[in-house]
């Protein structure tokens, strides 16, 4: 983690040196949002569209949330479709339908993971409007969920869900580059739901209360570890039945690698964290450690490594426990 990123989530006074740039960034972001919303908001698609995103850089848990919401919606008899930017992939401005066997180099890691975990129609494109239009032309769906896209204001949205990491919160509450925010904290007052991922430390995250966010729009989510899955063989081991070495390599190319390490610690392991940039394209050289200890990675990273992973490699499967009322609110958009 860079010194600047660390400072954003600590009371470091030196980051305020960037405050003039942050005010400029915030003003430009707000002006852009108002201009694009005036043009596109109010031009709905044939089915409701729900954006699942965040206002802070770094991982907040939006992908597990989206997967969990899709499962709850399908249990209600709803047919969801999914659109994504396809970060880390090469699809670009041409809409691409993602299948379980799609090349991760083309569609990106998150989109491939989502398509596999949900078995729902999934389309990636740098132009999310084009992705939505392609999805609607190709599949019969009742609702569309956008993986990320909170700041993609060319999308009319019928519901906005913002995800916040409980431990990190909103950092120092400042916009880029003085802080981690893409938009000012007050933006959370305008979304339909704020999902808090995890539990804040004592005396920790209180930004929502300070903002005056209505309690009725705040939901809790926890990521529950399910099992370890061996990448080469598919063998599955329950978390409480792990009998291999306690010392492991934890490999994470996600927005918040420390959260993955902390999860492994909570499971009784002693991980050595190897943090990579979000959406990092792994090669065998990245895992060339000087020992034979097990290597445990996130499911998002595993889709990029499974074709060449050796016998040391495992992934940790997790599931989001979500207040069912949130999915009910989405169902109400349809009915």
Image (cartoon, rainbow, N blue to C red):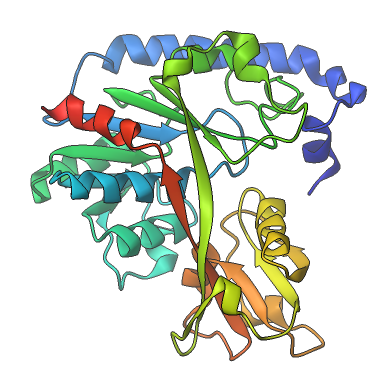
Number of numbered discs visible in the structure rendering:
0
Tell me where residue 288 appears, x and y as whole percent. Answer: 73, 83
Q: Residue at x 61, y 77 (%)?
A: 283
Nearer to me, 308 or 323: 323
Give residue 241's quadrant in the image. bottom right
Q: Residue at x 57, y 72 (%)?
A: 239
Decide if residue 282 is in sight here.
no
Q: Residue at x 52, y 85 (%)?
A: 308
Left of 178 or right of it: where is 251? Answer: left
Q: Is residue 20 above or below residue 9?
A: above
Nearer to me, 129 or 298: 298
Q: Is residue 152 above or below residue 40?
A: below
Decide if residue 214 is in sight here.
yes
Tell me where residue 245 appears, x and y as whole percent. Answer: 73, 84
Nearer to me, 214 or 6: 214
Tell me where residue 237 appears, x and y as whole percent. Answer: 51, 80
Tell me where residue 47 appears, x and y as whole percent. Answer: 14, 31
Give residue 285's quadrant in the image. bottom right
Image quadrant containing the C terminus: top left
Q: Residue at x 59, y 91 (%)?
A: 311
């Amino acid at each position: 983690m860079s010194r600047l990123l660390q400072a954003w989530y600590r009371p470091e006074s030196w980051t305020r040196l960037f405050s003039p740039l942050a005010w400029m960034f915030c003003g430009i972001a707000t002006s852009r949002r108002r201009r694009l919303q005036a043009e596109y908001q109010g031009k709905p698609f044939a089915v409701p569209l729900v954006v699942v995103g965040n206002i802070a850089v770094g991982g907040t848990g939006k992908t597990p949330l989206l997967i969990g919401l899709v499962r709850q919606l399908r249990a209600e008899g709803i047919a969801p479709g999914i659109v994504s930017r396809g970060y880390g992939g090469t699809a670009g401005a041409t809409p691409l339908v993602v299948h379980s066997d799609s090349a991760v180099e083309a569609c990106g890691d998150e989109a491939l993971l989502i398509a596999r975990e949900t078995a729902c129609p999934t389309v990636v494109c740098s132009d999310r409007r084009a992705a939505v239009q392609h999805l609607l032309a190709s599949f019969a769906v009742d609702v569309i969920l956008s993986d990320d896209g909170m700041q993609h204001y060319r999308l009319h949205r019928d519901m906005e869900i913002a995800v916040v990491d409980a431990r990190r919160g909103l950092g120092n509450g400042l916009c880029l580059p003085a802080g981690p925010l893409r938009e000012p904290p007050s933006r959370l007052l305008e979304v339909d739901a704020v999902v808090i991922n995890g539990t804040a430390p004592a005396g920790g995250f209180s930004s929502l209360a300070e903002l005056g966010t209505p309690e009725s729009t705040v939901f809790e989510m926890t990521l529950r570890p399910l099992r370890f899955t061996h990448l080469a063989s598919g063998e599955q081991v329950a978390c409480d039945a792990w009998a291999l070495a306690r010392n492991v390599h934890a490999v994470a190319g996600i927005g918040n690698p420390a959260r993955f390490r902390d999860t492994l610690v909570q499971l009784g392991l002693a991980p050595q964290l190897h943090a990579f940039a979000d959406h990092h394209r792994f090669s065998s050289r990245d895992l060339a450690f000087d020992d034979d200890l097990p290597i445990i990675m996130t499911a998002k990273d595993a889709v990029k490594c499974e074709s060449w992973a050796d016998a040391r490699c495992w992934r940790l499967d997790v599931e989001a426990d979500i207040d069912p009322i949130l999915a009910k609110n989405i169902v109400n958009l349809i009915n």
